[in-house]
Image (tube, helix red, strand yellow):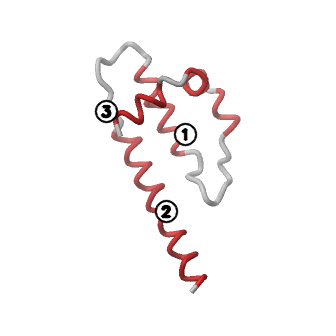
Amino acid sequence: MNSMLQCLAQSPPLTAAFRDGSYKAMVNRANPLGTGGKLAEAWADVVRKMFSGSFSTVVPKEFKQVLVLAQLHFLSMVASFDRFLL
């Protein structure tokens, strides 16, 4: 996961949006298939810490927790859809 986070963090337009908060206008918090903006907020926290200059290392524990919950939510939706198809 470390390499994926580093790649995302080095995407200038993406990082700029999360550093200045402009991503908030792009998040669809009402999407029933999404995380209500929790994943975006967790990523914003990681980006702020990475570029703050206050930390020599950043442990994205909260981001990972939100990502795991999002994955479980998605997998449960897929399982429900699979049962519907049978």
Q: CA distance from mark 3 to mark 2?
A: 23 Å
Mark 3 burial class by Cα count in 10 Å: few <14, some 14-19, many 20+ = few
Q: Are marks 1 and 2 in contact (CB under 8 Å)?
A: no
Q: CA distance from mark 1 to mark 2?
A: 16 Å
Mark 1 residue type = Ala
Q: How many marks?
A: 3
Identify residue for label 2: 73
In the picture shown, does residue 35 fall above or below 8?
A: below
Q: Secondary structure at mark 1?
A: helix
**Residue 2 image point, x, y percent:** 34, 35
Identify residue for label 1: 40
Which mark, by number, is residue 28? none
Mark 2 residue type = His
**Picture quadrant of residue 5:** top left
Q: Secondary structure at mark 2?
A: helix
Q: Could you tell me which quadrant the C terminus lies in? A: bottom right
Which mark, by number, is residue 59? 3
